Amino acid sequence: MEKPPVDPQNPWLELRRLTPARIALGRTGTSLPTRAQLDFQFAHAQARDAVHLPFDHATLGTQLSEGGNESLLLHSAAPDRNSYLQRPDLGRKLSDESAQALRDYAAAHPGGVDLAIVVADGLSALAVHRHTLPFLTRLQEQMSGDGWSVAPVVLVEQGRVAIGDEIGQLLGAKMVVMLIGERPGLSSPDSLGLYFTYAPKVGLTDAYRNCISNVRLEGLSYGMAAHRLLYLMREACRRQLSGVNLKDEAQLHTLESEAGADMKRNFLLDPPSA
C-alpha cells in the first residue's frame, strides 16, 4: 500500500515510516480514515487465516529430505484444529499412537542423542512454512563444529510448546529445540518462536525453557537467532541447566559493537570518547 506524503507540519508522519505500529493514522470526523480502517481489517484477516491455515507437513518433510534431513511425523492428542484451539492441554502431549511410534523409534535407535529439533504448527503454520528451512540451514551451518548427535527433525501437527519435552524425553535427548508458529499479531502473522530446554521431561514449566521470539524477515534475522540459540545451547551443556537461570548474553556483532569498548558504554550517561 502506498505511504501517504510527508507533511512537514506533522513530524508523526515521518516517524510512521520507521515502524509498522499504527501511529499517526489521522481521522475523519470522529472515526479512522477509510485507508486505516481497511488496513486494520486486512491485518486482522491475515492473523485469522494464519491461525487456521493447515500445516503442510508433507511439503516441509520433502524439503527437509532434499536438504539431507530425515524427519518423523507425529500428532498431538488434539484430533483437529477446533479441539486444539479449545483444549490447549491436548496440544501439549502426543497422541497415544504417536507416543508409541516414537518409543518404537527410540528402541530401534538406542543411546539417545544430544539434540532433538521439533517443528510444530502452533498458532501460525504460515510462520513454520516460511521460516523453518532457512533458519535450520543457518543453525546447522553454525553448529557444524560442535559434533552434537541430532535426531531426525520431528514434525508435529496441532502441537504446543510443552510437547517438545515429551518428545525429547522419549528420544533420550540431552537438549530439545522447538520451532513453533507464534500467536499472530496485527503486523506479524508469520512470527516463528524458538523454545530451548536442557534435559527435557514431561511436566516442566516455562521457567525451564529459554525463548527466542519474532524470528522472521521483519524481525530477528535467521543468523542472529541461530547465534543466540547456539550460545544458549553451549552454555546449557557447560552449566547443565536452562530457563530462568540461563541468560542470553551472546555477543552480537553490530556496527556499534565493532568499536570494541564502545559496546559497553551507555550513550545516555557516559560522555563521548575522545
Image: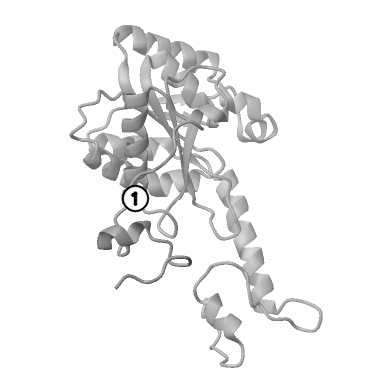
Structure colour scheme: one colour
Q: Camera-side residue: 80 or 204?
A: 204
Rendered image quadrant of residue 265:
bottom left
Residue 175 at x, y = what percent? Answer: 38, 24
Taking 30 as reference, is 106 above or below it? above
Residue for point 29% across, 73% down: 274
Label 1 Cα neighbours within 10 Å, binned few <14 / some 14-19 / many ≥20: some
Q: Camera-side residue: 39 or 144?
A: 144
Q: Camera-side residue: 111 or 56?
A: 111
Rendered image quadrant of residue 238:
top left
Taking 265 as reference, is 63 above or below it? above
Residue for point 32% across, 70% down: 273
In the picture of the structure, the residue carrying the numbered disc 1 is 224
Residue for point 39% across, 35% down: 58
Rendered image quadrant of residue 221:
bottom left
Residue 241 at x, y = what percent? Answer: 42, 24
- Number of marks in the image? 1
Q: Is residue 153 visible?
A: no
Secondary-structure class at tag 1: helix
- Three-letter amino acid code of the residue under disc 1: Met
Q: Is residue 28 left or right of residue 22?
A: right
Q: Is residue 94 visible?
A: yes
Residue for point 45% across, 20% down: 200
Taking 121 as reference, is 115 above or below it? above
Q: Camera-side residue: 240 or 136?
A: 240
Q: Residue furthest left?
A: 145
Q: Residue furthest bottom?
A: 8
Residue 176 at x, y = what percent? Answer: 40, 26
Taking 100 as reference, is 166 above or below it? below
